Structure formats: structure tokens, C-alpha cells
Image (cartoon, helix red, strand yellow):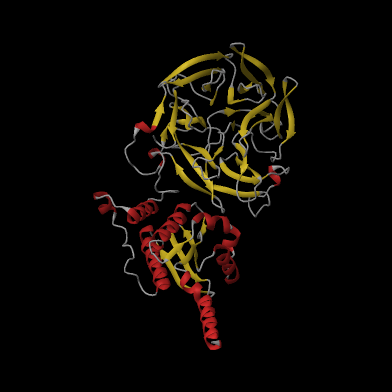
Amino acid sequence: MRKTCKWITGLLFLIISIQPLWAKEKTTVGILPFVIHSAENIEYVRQGIGEMLISRISGQEKIEVIGRESVRETVSEKELQNLSASNLDKLGEKLGADFLVWGSITKIGNSLSIDAKLADITAGKNVVNVYAQCPTMDEVIPQINDFAQKIVGHILGGMPQTMPSPPPSKEIVAARQPSGQTSREAEIISGMRGGRKGTFTSSINPDFINAAQPLDRKTFWKSQQFMNEFRGMDIGDVNGDGLKETVIIDSHNILVYQRKDGAFKKIEQISGKSYDYYVGLDVSDINGNGIPEIIVSSYAGQQVDSFVVEFRDGRFVTIASGLPWFLRVINNSSGVPVLLGQRRGIENPFDTQIHEIVWQSGEYREGKRMRIPQGLSVYGLTLDKIGSSGAERIIALNESDYLYIYDQTDKPLSKIAVFGGSDELIWKSDDVFGGSNTIIEPVNKSADSTMEIRESYFINLRILTYDTNGDGKREIIIVKNLSSAGRLMQNVKLFTSAEVYNLEWDGLGMVENWRTRKINGYVADYQFKDIDNDGENEIVLALVLSTVGTVKDRSVIVAYDLRGE
């Protein structure tokens, strides 16, 4: 009996000790974002390689690829740049991965090289290596495909019979509609070959993809043409009727329209003086009385002369005038509107401190100074939580239209290092965004007082943040105005087309989720609000169709439904 008990006890111990071996049915693989060494933005290559590896490897029943979100939240750019055997083990433990895929992509001229590795975390060594020098993207793709096959073969012990076949050629894809994983890989490869940045397919509005399908005009709405040049646009219930109005400004007029039952109907026009020069517009309830104010930034005679209009007693009245600030409303990370103000500088109109403007004792007053570096403009700026720190950060366009992300600081912009590293500078873009034709020309006198030197400054576009896909993370919605002449001339920026981008922080930097197709015209302003009172926000553009030098100014309002319905 005693022997039997010992035998049973030993068997139970053996069963318990080896249980994890059969309990774990799948091998987990974490695919780290490849480190990029390039003077240009090749994020589309990194995304394409990552997605291709995921699609090839995750097709195996006995292999589980760790989700991209888990990788993004765990791995920092600094860790990627300084990978070693020791921190590979740590990353593997954090991710719960048996294997890690990592490597680098280097682009010099037209040549692109890939150094990719599969690390066995349990064994503490690299077991599969691929190094390839590729003169074209077409040669990159077979290398990545071969690497994926080697990974699967090593993990499963020999080349699996169920390995998905390589995607068909462009000609075959065009002739028939592929499905499943093969379709997805074909789209990824097509995007990589075409050098298209960002997501290669989209489940949202068909106009928000970079393929070349015919334009489906059911996915957007366009107003009638207006014979003036729009300067600004915003949306809100400015007359208290329970429906939202679209408020527009040109150089010296305020137009109030409402979209209802398919029509875009004029509600009110508030005309200023012919010499007025409106440069910015916001609609928001800053004074807290339940009716959003119409907040207009005006620049007349080299002086800031902003004002506020509100609907009272059945009519629109000016409740504040002669305000000395450039004004802009932003929504913070909690969605609370904040009115920012900036006084005009002497040499540079935006080289001054930015303050919160508050409503006190029946008037707008200068409140606390914002922890925003002096040297940034109140235009092309917002605050939101980007990254894992939980703190609001500054998202701003600089004078050259590059997008920057800073920690909040009292340092002047001139004291924040752009190159060589900075504690305050979190990230900067490789591409330009924004772009404006609305110009301000301060007059600077030279030593010879008879001579005037004029330098132009521009009112940049707003930056919006919003959780458009409902995943709990706010993305950046930003416009890029385009010019066939580029941005070489400092004082002249004639934009003729535009794109709207959606960017998201992936733990390492901002990556593109989607963008609209190229839109003919220049975006003077935009919003992500409900223009048609259906309870859903739309991307709404104030689009100028004509440019300087044409016979007549022409503008329209265009609204894109986010889901293309």
C-alpha cells in the first residue's frame, strides 16, 4: 500500500512538472519595429515590412504573433536603438515572447539594406539572420518573404506545408480579386513598391485611402460656391436654436450658414469695414452662458484688433472689441475648450508669451501664462496627451511647417535644442504639414530709416486631436497644403491642393493611420465637428478653389463622413 502511494505521488509530481510543456499550445513571437537609418522618411517601408512579417507568420496555427499595440506600449525608441542580448531577454519577458524578431533598415540614395534577426529568448541567442543589400523595393520583398519562411521553419521544425504562397503579381491581382491573407499581403507589397506612406488599405471612408479607385461622390458633401476667399471656419450652435451653424470669415465679413435637409442656408451676414483684415475664427462658449461666442482675430493697421460676437436678445451683437491678442481655441486632453491669446511681437509677431484668456467680471482678461516656449505661434498649436507619460504635451508647427512635440516648459524656443538631443523635444516630423496663404507683414526699419524691410509671417492652420476610431487614444488630425512650386519662397506660398492626415503615436513616434486623397484647392481652415446635425462628426474643410492671380475668388465648404456612409 505504502509503495502504491509513493508511486501515485511520484506520478502526480511528474504530471505537474511536465504540464506546462503540453499546456502551452502555441509559440509566441514578438515583432519589434525595425530601426530606421535614413535621411528621409521611410516609415512606409518599416510599416510594410512589419505587416508583411505579421501576415506571413501569424498564418500558422501553432504560432501566435503578439499584437502591435502590446509591442508599442512595451518598447521605446531608445531600447530599439540600444538592443543587446541582455535587454532582449528583458523585452521578451515583458512581452511574454518565446522569440523576438528585430533588425534595422538603412537607406542610402536609392539603395536599401536590411539586417533582420530572429532571437530565441529561451536559448539567449540569434538563430536566424538575414542581411540583404537591395537596389530596388522589388528585391526587398523576396528577402522578407524568405526571412518569414525561415522563422516559421525554425520554430516548427522544418518548412510547413501550410505556408501561404507568395502574393500574386500586379497583373494577376488586377485580373481577379484575391481574398484573405493573400489579398492583404498584395496590398502591403503594392504600397511598398509605390512608396506610399502609411496605411495601405482602409476600412473607413473610401476617400481616405491612397489607392486609385474612382472617386465615389457619395462619400462627401460640397456646398454651393462662394465668390470670396475664406479665411476661417468653425461650427457651433451660435443662435441657440438647438442646431449647429457653420460660421465662416473672409477678409472682413462673418457668414453664418446652416446645413439642414440637404441645403446650406444663409442665417446671417455680419459685415466689417473694407479695411479690416480677419485672420482667424473660433466658435466656443468661453464666457459660460450656454451660447458659443464667435471669436474673430483681426489684424488692421499693423495692430491686433480682435473682437467677439454673441447672439443676444434675438440678434448678433459685439460683446468685446479692441482685444490685443491673436486668439485661438484649443480643446485640451479632457475635451475642455481653452482660449489662448498672444500679443503681437515687435520684429516677429509671434515671438511673445502665450496666455490663457479667461472671462472675468464681464470681460476677457489675460490669465495664466501657458508653459509653452516663447517663439511658438498660437496658431498651429494644441495641447494633448501623447505617449505614455500621462502629461499634456505641446503639439506645434514651426515657421517652416514641420510638426514638433514638446514637453511643456518655460524655456524659450531658442533654448531648446533641435539637433543633438533635448529633454523637452520629444519628436519632430520629417515631412511638412499645415501651410497657409493668410499673411501678416510687420514692418521692420533698418538702420537707414528711409528703407523698410518687410518679412512675411503666416497664420498657420489649427491642429486637432480626437479619438476618431474609438480605441481610447486620441489621434492628430492635420492638413497638408501642397504647392507645385514647393515652399522655396519665404514670402509667397501659393497652395493649390491639399491632403488631410490622421496621425497616431505608436510609442516611438507619430505614424500615419490614413489620409484623404489629394483635394483640389487650398484648405484655409478645417474642423472635426457635426455640420449636418446628424449626431456624428464630419471632417469639414473651408476650401479655396482659386489662387492669387485668378479673376475671381471662389470657395466652398466640403464635408467628409468619416465612415463614408
Q: Nearer the viewer, residue 236 or 322?
A: 236
Apparent side of residue 445 relative to residue 538 in the rendered image (left or right): right
In the rendered image, is residue 66 in sight? yes
Above or below for 40 versus 98: above
Task: Identify the image quadrant of the C terminus.
Answer: top left
Residue 32 in percent (x, y) is at 51, 61
Pick whichever, 382 or 184, lies toward us: 184
Q: Is residue 331 above or below residue 124?
A: above
Specify the farthest residue to the bottom: 3
- Residue in the image at 59% along x and 11% along y: 315
The spot of residue 130 in percent (x, y) is: 44, 69
Res. 78 image quadrant: bottom right
Q: Position of residue 530 (x, y in %)?
A: 49, 29
Residue at the far front in the pictured view: 1
On screen, residue 300 versus residue 253, left or right, reads right
108, above or below 426, in the image: below
Q: Residue at x 60, y 38 (%)?
A: 399
Of residues 233 and 565, the one drawn nearer to the viewer in this rendering: 565
Q: Residue at x 52, y 66 (%)?
A: 97
Label count reads 0
The percent position of residue 110, horizontal first and vertical second, equals 42, 57
Regarding residue 451, the answer to whether it shows in the image is no
